[in-house]
């Protein structure tokens, strides 16, 4: 996996691009640094909250999220987003 400023790219062992996922990376607007959850990728940058299939590069889900903090629950079945006094849960 290669995380660039304009896209995430998966490169195969043969050196060929298997898929790419466009995004707008801004280090000053990162709420959740991209992290692997199993073979998938979870991130929140510039209020875009996404869970990307690591095999295909397609979003499993994607939306807007203005949370102040994120937590993965044990077992990686849910991610919790906290914004002020509001708590939201997203399935993984």
Image (cartoon, rainbow, N blue to C red):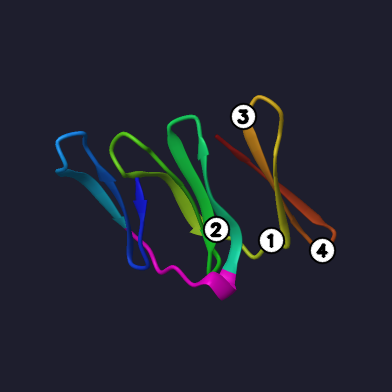
Q: Which class describes the residues within 10 Å of circle 2: few (<14), some (14-19), or many (20+)? A: many
Residue that appears at 85% across and 59% down: 85
Helix, strand or loop at mark 3: loop
- Do labels 2 and 1 touch, CB within 8 Å? yes
Location of mark 3 (residue):
77
Mark 4: few/some/many CA within 10 Å (<14, 14-19, 20+): few
Residue 8 in which image quadrant: bottom left
Position of residue 50 relative to residue 48, above or below, is above
Image quadrant occupied by the N terminus: top left
Residue 80 as seen in the image, left or right of residue 7: right
The residue lying toward the viewer, choosing from 77 and 6, is 6
In terms of secondary structure, where does tag 4 sit? loop
The answer for how far apart the CA atoms under marks 4 and 1 are is 8 Å
| Residue marked by disc 1 | 67
Residue wearing tag 2: 44
Q: Secondary structure at mark 1?
A: loop
Lower position in the chain sequence, tag 3 or tag 4: 3
Of label 3 and label 2, which has the lower sequence position?
2
Q: Pointers 3 and 4 in contact (CB under 8 A)?
A: no
N-terminal of the pair, mark 3 or mark 1, is 1
Report, in whole angstroms, how far the alpha carbon at label 3 lies from the one at label 1.
19 Å
Between the C-alphas of marks 3 and 4, the distance is: 23 Å
Residue 82 x, y percent position in the rendering? 75, 55
The residue drawn where x is 53% and y is 71% is 27
Q: Which residues are magenta?
A: 22-29
Residue at coordinates 50% horizontally, 57% vertically from top-left? 63
Find numbered disc 2 in the image and state the secondary structure of the residue it sits on: strand
Residue at left 58%, top 65%? Answer: 30
């Amino acid at each position: 996996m290669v995380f660039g400023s304009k896209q995430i790219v998966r490169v195969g062992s043969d050196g060929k691009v298997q898929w790419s996922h466009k995004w707008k990376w801004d280090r000053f607007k990162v709420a959740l640094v991209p992290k692997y959850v199993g073979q998938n990728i979870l991130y929140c940058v510039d209020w875009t909250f996404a869970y990307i299939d690591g095999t295909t590069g397609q979003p499993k889900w994607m939306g807007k999220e203005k949370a102040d903090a994120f937590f993965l629950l044990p077992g990686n079945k849910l991610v919790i987003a906290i914004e002020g006094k509001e708590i939201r849960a997203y399935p993984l």
